[in-house]
Image: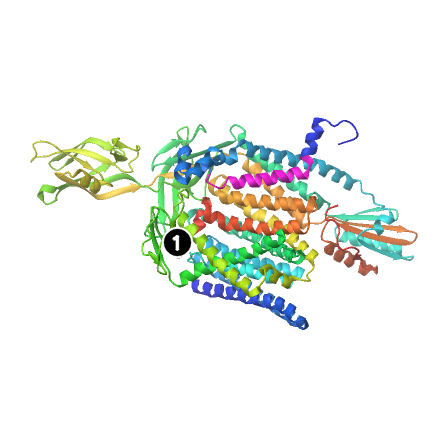
Amino acid sequence: MNNGKKRSVFDGIWDFFASVKVGVTIIVLLAVGSVLGTIYPQTNAIPSPNPEFYYYDTYGKLGDFYYRIGLADTFNSWWYLTLVLMLFISLIIVSIDRGIPLYKSLKRQPVARKVIGIKGDRLYTHVEGPEAQVKLDELAAKLKKRRYKVRREDGALMAEKGRLARFGAYVIHLGLIITILGVFSRLIPGWYYTDMIWLKEGETKAVGDLGFSVQNNGFTLEFYDKEQTRAKKFETDAVVFEDGKQTAAKHLAVNDYLTYKHTNIYQNSYDPQPMFRTGTIELLDTKNNNKPLGTFVLDFNDPKREYKVGDYTLTMTNYFPDIKIDPEKGVFTNSRDPYNPGIQFDITGPDQTEPARQWMLPLAGPFVKQMLGQDYRFDLQFKDVDLFHMTGLKIERDLGWWPIVFPGLIIALYGLVLAFYFQHRRVWARLEEGVLHIGATTNKNWLGITGELNKVLVPLGIEPVSQKRKEEPQQS
Amino acid sequence: MMQLSSIFFGTAFFSYLAATILYVVGLTGRKMKAQSAALATFWTKWGYIVIIIGVVTQALAIATRGIYGGYTPVSNMFEYMSFWAFTIMLAFVIINAFYKVPVLGAFVAPIGLVILAYASVFPRDSKPLIPALQSYWLNIHVTTAALGEGILTISFAAGLMYLLVTSDLTKNSRTAKFLEFTVYLFFALLSFVATSLGFRAAGYEVNLTGTMGDLLYHLPPFIGTSGTELGTATHFLGLPLPFFDAPAWMHAADAGQQLNTILVTIIASLILYGLLRLLARKPISMVIQKWVRGLDADMLDELSYRAVAIGYPVFTLGALVFAMIWAQEAWGSYWSWDPKETWALITWLYYTAYLHFRLQRGWEGKKTAWMAVVGFVVILFLLVGVNLVISGLHSYAKA
């Protein structure tokens, strides 16, 4: 890069990113940054839509500080992404800066090396005498058998194998470059879509603007134990509709998803709190020793205005699907789903002058009776109740995973195998003045190449090689 | 089948214990009686054989437990930690076959033993798998990751030995202090295991009633958490409990118990360490240093690096790539910055830095040996700290 001329800004940037020191510093900073990001849960993992209160409420002042300085969203912060980008640039520049010269030097290797060079190799042996030329030919044949790539010139030989192992580090870099590209492919419009949809049984919901909708055709939940603490399985019969037609269907389970138009639909979770579907309710006469007066069926998703039980009429005056009673806010519904229904009836019958107005609260009934101290004229009891859970499906479209991220990882792994488990082995032989000089080098595992060479040399009657020095730099 | 597994498990535990004793006796014996060098190799040779017996029986323990439970037993802390101990011992058996460094066993065997003992602190019952874990990727991802961590643990042991061989501990240097502290940490882990198992074996139980539900606690609750009732435990050895409450800024519901466990561990470890120190009349690291005196430092350095070179690709495959594939299969997102995931990445980045220092900057010897030692602490946090301190997608492994 530097050939005496004035160095440009480009050269400066190039040299900066080509420095291993800089690369490792980026790696260390990423590691430290990642540690900071695990101190408290990140905003995407907290069970609250209001992070500004959540961190203080859950983790106190430290948590609040953590949120305020932006660490609650470390992995999307500008500085973290900048570090990733710098790593990306560093990987590319380091690989070009070192990989290309290495490629060139290996490409230009001479077959006939100077004898003084061969003599200086860590592994060296020689053979003298009239049969030296024959030995050279035999050596070439033997090395070929051991899958060395053998090149010959007059009186010289160069055998090489595992050259790619020298590029292991750059193959890893390439794999990581592709992986990072794949991760950022999420930024391309339409390439990445993520959503979570909650479906009641029978319910259909459109998936964003992807043009199709998903229906829950039935949800099953099974536990291992009676106490229902350890879920065995939760599965949804999912159906996909597009343009009013059913286009796909699958029985979804965790780890078994449905793919529709490059979009995956996953069984992700379920709402642990059940909802009321229907209930068979019995009307009891409290004045008459709780005498049963008859039953009616209530559909909590679609309650009727009026129910007839024998001679009695129940008129619904109020329906709160998810009732909450608050001393300040009064009575209100928390959601539109029947998690905790509260129904107010006016009950009229033959023996009444005016209707009895009373609440029916399946989940909070006893509590309300205690609080209000009301002496109800009637009692409403469930004879049979049908509860159900809402299923949570995750919709994920990540077009970068299969074609980019995954191959990137495989390439990086291949590079790791090359870099750590394979060796570049080179053998040179040169006939000069009736003496055949044989030398060999490798970038690692000297024991391996020594053994391999001796397996070749000993049958040829050549003196076995032995390592000259014990220590030598690992990479050349 | 479960009983058979327990028998195999116990056999493996005692094999590792016997191997530890054989190795330590072999080493100290060699130094104490210079004339019995042959005897010392006899001890370490048997140590190696006994470790192999331990590895084989633990493999049987894992297999039988797997047959009983119907899944590869790596799904909770007990199963995972004991599996890690298994991979450490297995990695040692294989590496020793190539490098023939029996002394390494005197370091690896106690580490594996303590980790195995630590595993038994957690509930040992085999629970059926929750849906998220019902995938063959559980076997592939977790076992490969553990194998990588096992091999990296060998680099820690060799690095520690290198430091002991090359450091002059008679001078009051930083190296000497840090090495002594590393040795102390080992005793801290040992004390934690001993106190936990001790109080449990003695049947000590406290029913804590808190805002987050009831909790059965096996140590005396010296520290209270606001909002937690101490139930039956009002006194310990005649002293009223709790001594004081956890500071208010520690909001977590079980902060009191965690702080208490740390306190008990520190007290117990200081007692244990103090006793040993009194017996030895010098830093424990100096006692251990005697065992390794005369070993080839370069060989240990090379061994420590080799273990990283072998373990790093295995760790990458198991803890990152397989994990990402599984996450993509199960959740549709190959990466979600879950704390465990992030810590696997941190560990990976750490060893990536190690390799760059070693290969590109020519760092050898002390610097990388220290990195190998600290690397073990990083792995320990990845495997234990994350589960106990931070909760996330892997929190099912807590129990």
Residue A274 image point, x, y percent: 31, 41
Look at the magenta stretch and give its main secondary structure: helix
Q: Which residue is at 61% across, 46% downward?
A: B351
Q: Which residue is mark 1?
A: B222
Judging from the image, mark 1 belongs to the subunit labelled B
Q: Relative to A315, is A31 above or below?
A: below
Q: How far across and down, in percent of the image, does residue B136 sit?
A: 49, 50
**Quadrant assignment for the N terminus of chain B:** bottom left
Q: Which residues are magenta?
A: A17-41
* B43 is within the stretch colored magenta: no
Q: Residue at x 48, y 63 (%)?
A: B9
Give the SS element for disc 1: loop
Q: Is residue A40 magenta?
A: yes
Q: Is residue B356 visible?
A: yes
On the image, which quarter does residue A216 sit in? top left
Mark 1 neighbour class, 10 Å CA radius: few under 14, some 14 to 19, many 20 or more: many
Nearer to us in this view, B202 or A393? B202
- The answer to whether residue B116 is left or right of residue A278 is right
- Frontmost residue, A56 versus A300: A56
Q: Nearer the viewer, residue B3 or B274?
A: B274
- The answer to whether residue A140 of the structure is visible from this angle is no
Relative image position of residue B111 (x, y in whole percent): 55, 59
In percent of width and height, residue A319 lies at 23, 32
